[in-house]
Image: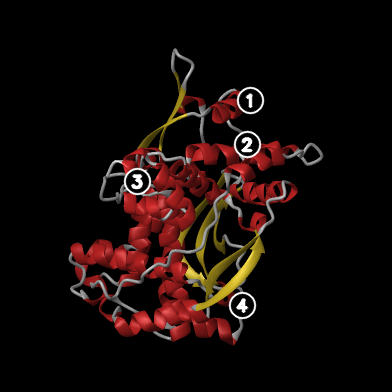
Amino acid sequence: MSTTFFLRSARKSGYASVCVRVQSSVLKVNIRQSTRLKVPVQKWNLARTSPAFWDYVTSEEGRTVFGKIAEIRQTIDAVIIGGKPVTASQVRHIVHDVVYKGYITTGNQSMTLGMYMDIYIDQVTKGIRKTQKGTDFSEGTVRSVARVRDLMLEFQAWSGRTYDFDDIDFDFRSRFMCYMYEHKDYNINTAAKSLNTLITMMSAAEAEGYHANRKCLSRQFKAKRKDVDEIYLTKEELTAISKADISTLPKLYEKARDIFMVGVYTAQRVSDYNNIRPDNIIRNPDGSVIINLRQKKTGVWVSIPAKDELKRILEKYSYRLPKVPDKSINLCIKEVARLSGVDSPVTIERTSGGRTSIQTHPKYALIHTHTARRTGATLMYLAGMDVFNICSVTGHSSIAMLKKYIKADKIERARTISSDAAFTKW
């Protein structure tokens, strides 16, 4: 029986999680478990006898990480020496008890920001911590929270200090935003999302009595996101895409096109329209079809009447759409759109590293999975559909949120207004 530790990551820099492996060919045991301990990849990969590695091991961060690694190994070995069977559940509990020992044994006084973030991530991952609506956090939110924890570790290594609850002030905000812009090359929205995710965790910790720092909870501290230029496809462009001859391309392209078109006709996120199954389908006696699904991100139930075009796609696959990875849909739909002649130049504004630039691209190059949702919402609006009904389909909680998805220009909106029967009566 042996207990070893390794990094389950392809990264060559930044931080990665340490995993423990307990294995024995005799006992037929091969258990792998993440410890949720984070280490800088470059330091971990140093030769164990090198001075640089021991400089890290003896640093404040290194002593904490390798101290817990040693304790995990000793605790597991003690179980083995005692002759007890080792199970995956045991290993998981040993890791949890060692990593969060300070929190478990001494209560709130020992809580730090880093420890709280680890616990927060653990709780949202396991579904222990719920949203304000009482639902599980979406997979995307869980990933975002974990990324911010890694980002904080990288930022602390770069700045040469460890930040705790009371250190999250406006000076921290300035340095953190600067780091994201200049060293991570984040755009405005990615940087804002990262800071605001950190604020969410700080707010939760304050509500639970772990700190009294309210500076970071002020309106001025929160980062504002910018409405980015996003495209939508016209009805003519959708027709060209749906009728394009792609018989010479692999079958994957046809499947990706069909799934994308389902996204347009349902105006849902890719996490929803790429997962429609027979149990989401309601077929009425009159032949009409309704798609009833619970959105992964929000937990909101939406019911979408199926247009004839959507019904044809669903029937093609016997109401069980094929599963195509999001990245594959992005690559395929760009190529299909290119072959369809959706190549008009589009000028957009992009912000990267805190700097704004004006760029021009052929339209097909800007199409991705979320374009389907924006296209669906926009075309419903241009057709004169009531905005409250559009919200009912898209699942937006307010018209203000829906407005971000309607990408029609002012002239198109004016045409829609003039054709509205209510406009002629006021």
Identified by mark 4, the residue type is Leu
Labelled pair 4, 3 in contact (Cβ < 8 Å) = no
Q: Is residue 100 above or below residue 412?
A: below
Q: State which mark lies toward you, 2 or 3.
A: 2
- Kindly report which numbered mark, 1 or 3, lies closer to the viewer in this rendering: 1
Whole-angstrom CA distance, mark 4 to mark 3, is 39 Å
Which residue position is annotated with label 4? 46
Say whether marks 1 and 2 touch (CB < 8 Å): yes
Q: Residue 258 carries which label?
A: 2
Image position, residue 386 (x, y; %): 36, 40
Q: Which residue is drawn at 30% across and 51% down?
A: 129
As drawn, is 24 to the left or to the right of 243? left
Which of the two residues, 61 or 301, is positioned nearer the viewer here? 301
Mark 2 residue element:
helix
Specify which label sits upstream in the sequence, 4 or 3: 4
Q: Is residue 162 visible?
A: no
Q: How far apart are marks 2 and 3 (CA)?
A: 30 Å
**Are the residues flagged by discs 4 and 1 in contact, CB closer than 8 Å?**
no
Q: Which of marks 4 and 1 is nearer the N terminus?
A: 4
Label 2 with label 3: CB-CB less than 8 Å:
no
Circle 1/circle 3 CB separation < 8 Å: no
Instruction: Work out how far the residue at label 1 is from the one at label 2, CA to CA, in angstroms.
Output: 10 Å
**Amino acid on which disc 2 is placed:** Asp
Contact, CB < 8 Å: mark 4 with mark 2? no
Q: Quadrant of the C terminus?
A: top left
Which mark, residue 136? 3
At 60% from the left edge and 29% from the top edge, which residue is drawn? Answer: 313
Image spot of residue 231 (x, y percent) = 55, 56
Q: What residue type is labelled 3?
A: Asp
First along the sequence among labels 4 and 2: 4
